Image: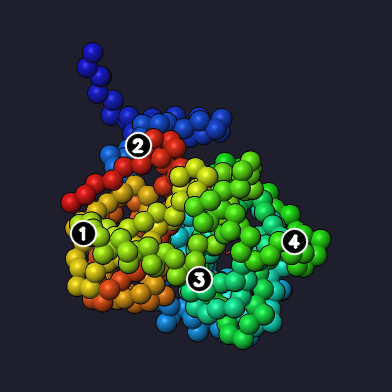
Amino acid sequence: MASVPQPNIGSARQDLYRRMDRHNLAPLWEVLHALIPNEPATPCKPALWKYRDARPYLMESGKLITAKEAIRRVLILENPGMRGESCITQSLYAGLQLILPGEIAPSHRHSQSALRFIVEGSGAYTAVDGERTTMHPGDFIITPSWTFHDHGNPGNEPVVWMDGLDIRIVQMFGAQFHEVYPEEVQPVSRSEGAAAARFGSGLIPLGAAAPFGRTSPIFNYPYARSRDALHMLSRDQDPDACHGWKMQYVNPLTGGHAMPTIAAFIQLLPKGYRTQAYRCTDGTIYSVVEGQGSVTVGGERFEFEPRDTFVVPSWKSMQIESNGETVLFSFSDRPGQEAMGLWKEKRG
Ligand code: GTQ
């Protein structure tokens, strides 16, 4: 049946909306296209943070607040499309954390999982559940959900790492918990390297339970080993057109992602390589370890060098051009998308 023309339909609708609004009701048809877009729509923008620009602010913060007072002395990498929301993509948080010689960041635990990717300096440690691990640039370190952790720097140089946390994911589920450890530093109950020996040598002790539930029992994946793996891979096979040589950090107990909410990767691109266009539904954060070049994301071009961070939003087409041999670390929310059958990629 054709609708009867009503000259005042616009104002009648507005009047209807106003009256139902008082009852917490809203018309779907006004927002349907925004709610169910034809393809991923995100406020997340492509962006690059030059380490050269960020570092002076981090060091100045180091003079104005101690790690102890700050609890965690971190500059949040805020996505320019979501300022004030403390996130780098719609689902993930990232920041640059500084710990100066002699400092400690006090022990606490939370339901949010964290990863650390070491950007500058050596000699600091992070302690997880009674075991310390020394940080070196390029190491990928995990703080599993609800494990007590503190950081310290007994060395003699500033140490900076990128934090990646699933804060927004845990917030979406309303599952946030936090607890302060009764002392500043948790006691050390195992020798350094215990986790790596138990789970990181292609061996597992018989009957060993997963110490961190669904998170990898290995909590430091050292750069020396990842770099060597990439090198060996590159000797035996051609680089992938979209990724170069790319590897995923795995949980040796499951063969799956190292963390239940965050996927992490490391990739090598030959010198003078230009990747084919690629897009996927997991907005991804990259930290440049070696080499330099440029990345084009959704038509915007960014030049990168070691220690820079950049973000590729969901479903934005990306292409990388490497000038020198380049190593990139990256992380995203892919495990959640895969578990829900949502993850999608497109090559070319
Ligand atoms: O190191 O525990 O960047 O709790 C944000 C929240 C780091 C940490 C962050 C945290 C931490």
User: What residue sits 65% from the left and 77% below the top?
Assistant: 153
Q: Spatial distance from mark 1 to mark 3, Cα to Cα?
A: 29 Å
Residue underneath mark 3 = 118
- Mark 2: which amino acid? Ile
Disc number for residue 36: 2
Q: Spatial distance from mark 2 to mark 4, Cα to Cα?
A: 51 Å
Residue 223 in view, yes or no: yes
**Of discs 2 and 4, which sits in the foreground?**
4
> Horizontally, is 134 left or right of 229 in the view?
right
Residue underneath mark 1 = 238
Disc number for residue 69: none
- Mark 3: which amino acid? Ile
User: What residue sits 31% from the left and 76% below the top?
Assistant: 291
Q: In this view, does 148 lie above or below 154?
A: above
User: What residue sits 63% from the left and 41% below the top?
Assistant: 207
Residue underneath mark 4 = 189
